[in-house]
Amino acid sequence: MKDAAELSRRAAADLLDAIDRDPAVVLGLPTGNTPLGMYRRVVATCRHAPRCFRDVRTFNLDEYVGLPAEHPGSYRSYMRRHLFDHVDVRCENMSVPDGTAREVLRQAPDLPFEEALRRECARYEAAIQAVGGLDVTYLGLGQNGHIAFNEPGSPLGSRTRAVELAPSTCAANARHFPPGEPVPQRALTMGIGTILESRRLVVLAAGAAKAEAVTRLARGEVTDDFPASALHLHWDVTVLVDEAAAAATFRRPS
Ligand code: GLP
């Protein structure tokens, strides 16, 4: 694709088509800069189709540990700002892992926090299973090859769990936080195994900063040093890249 705008158009068309085919589709949804254009276009289209998201179920890939949902840097806030507040998705149908495990702790206030997080992750996995699994999951690509918050070294069969973030990931995500405010160093993330169970995967990578990761992904060697390489184990993956992200991998036909 020529640029990020074209990539966003294609990604939005893909997502809207998935809803068209199955109005009760179960979507895995990403955050970050890359999907912003996709969400903008989906919102613009759904304004004219008010029942767009009425029966859609969504599960976000990840969330920071310790940030309340209302914090502007939380992924739940991001999703509200960029999608949930603008479409008719039902509250009970949109799920983001809770990095404060509020509901678990409300029910069992004496639980140690780590155990509460573990239970929140188990609850999240069970909620995905309860609706029959993810149909289509959209993913960004970290510069170090992370998918969701599965950093290098994540086991290929990993499930939803609490993880430590790489310093480079915290640095890259600092722009989503008010100046001077530290980026949390831990997150809850769907595991690579969880993601690979989605029936279809769509990866979005735009901009020169992703060129190296795209080259490594295209190389095809599956290794837990480069989490995105696990995508080669899936049977139905679409990778959408713009020219800047593809520049080091593919030559333009002359
Ligand atoms: C964060 C998210 C990932 C996302 C990545 C890339 O780390 N947890 O899910 O893919 O950022 O973000 P960006 O699109 O801003 O480059």
Image (spheres, helix red, strand yellow):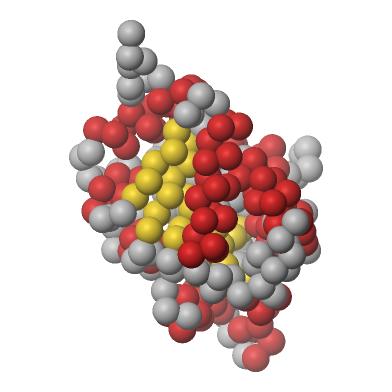
**Res 201 visible:** yes
Where residue 102 appears, x then y in whole percent? Answer: 67, 78
Q: Quadrant of residue 129?
A: bottom left
Is 43 left or right of 188, judged from the image as shown?
right
Residue lying farthest to the left in this orientation: 221
Residue lying farthest to the bottom in this orientation: 107
Compare residues 144 and 243 and report the one nearer the observer.
243
Where residue 240 appears, x then y in whole percent? Answer: 44, 38
Picture layout, residue 27 above or below residue 39? below
Is 201 left or right of 25, judged from the image as shown?
left
Compare residues 5 and 178 and report the one nearer the observer.
5
Compare residues 190 and 177 and report the one nearer the observer.
190
Is 104 left or right of 82, judged from the image as shown?
left
- Which residue appears at 48% of the width and 36% of the height? 205
- Which residue appears at 69% of the width and 51% of the height? 45
Compare residues 230 and 14 and report the one nearer the observer.
14
Number of numbered discs present?
Answer: 0
- Which residue appears at 78% of the width and 38% of the height? 179
**Res 119 visible:** no
Q: Quadrant of residue 170?
A: top right
Picture layout, residue 188 above or below residue 178? below
- Which residue appears at 37% of the width and 20% of the height? 248
Residue lying farthest to the top in this orientation: 254
Picture layout, residue 64 above or below residue 220? below
Question: Which quadrant holds the C terminus?
Answer: top left
Where residue 201 appears, x then y in whole percent? Answer: 40, 54
Picture layout, residue 210 above or below residue 173? above
Where residue 200 appears, x then y in whole percent? Answer: 38, 58
